Image (tube, grey):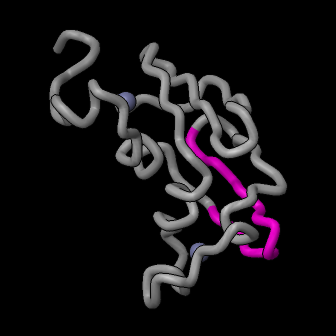
Amino acid sequence: MAATIKRIRPVGRYAVGIDWTDGHESILPHRHLRLACPCNACVAATPEVGPKECEAAFVRAIGAATLFIAWADEHETLFVADELRALCRCAYCVREPNYPISGQ
Ligand SMILES: [Zn+2]
Ligand SMILES: [Zn+2]
């Protein structure tokens, strides 16, 4: 089963930290998250992303499988856990994206 969100925590002013149920930890910069917004509008045309667009006014996990972000420009983003995990750019994920973490 794919990992889900165990806990989120702020990391400074510009990133959110995700603790995953498989023990992995991700630190995802707000800018990176905004640029990866999977909503129809953002997928259709990558928006201009200035400081306001990258300011997360509100971040909350909805259950274990969804992350909700409300941005300072009033845009809203929903990520499902799989999308979020795919955005992790830690050394481990970048080097071994398909390596199973919990032995299988
Ligand atoms: Zn969007
Ligand atoms: Zn990672």
Horizontal side, residue 53 vs residue 29: left or right: right
- Residue 19's image quarter? top right
Q: Can you say which quadrant of the picture contains the C terminus?
A: top left
Percent x, y of residue 72: 81, 67
Percent x, y of residue 78: 62, 60
- Residue 8's image quarter? top right
Percent x, y of residue 84: 47, 46
User: Which of the four quarters of the rendered structure image does ligand 1 lie in?
Assistant: bottom right
Q: Nearer the viewer, residue 51 or 81?
A: 51
Q: Nearer the viewer, residue 28 or 41?
A: 28
Determine the residue positioned at 71% across, 56% down: 69
Q: Which span is picked out in magenta? A: 65-77
Q: Is residue 95 above or below residue 73?
A: above
Determine the residue positioned at 77% across, 62% down: 70
Determine the residue positioned at 20% across, 10% down: 103
Q: Main secondary structure of the magenta part?
A: strand
User: Is residue 45 highlighted in magenta?
Assistant: no
Q: Can you say which quadrant of the picture contains the N terminus?
A: top left
Determine the residue positioned at 16% across, 29% down: 96
Q: Is residue 16 above or below residue 32?
A: above
Tag count: 0
Percent x, y of residue 16: 64, 38
Q: Nearer the viewer, residue 94 or 14?
A: 14
Q: Is residue 62 visible?
A: no
Q: Is residue 60 above or below residue 26?
A: below
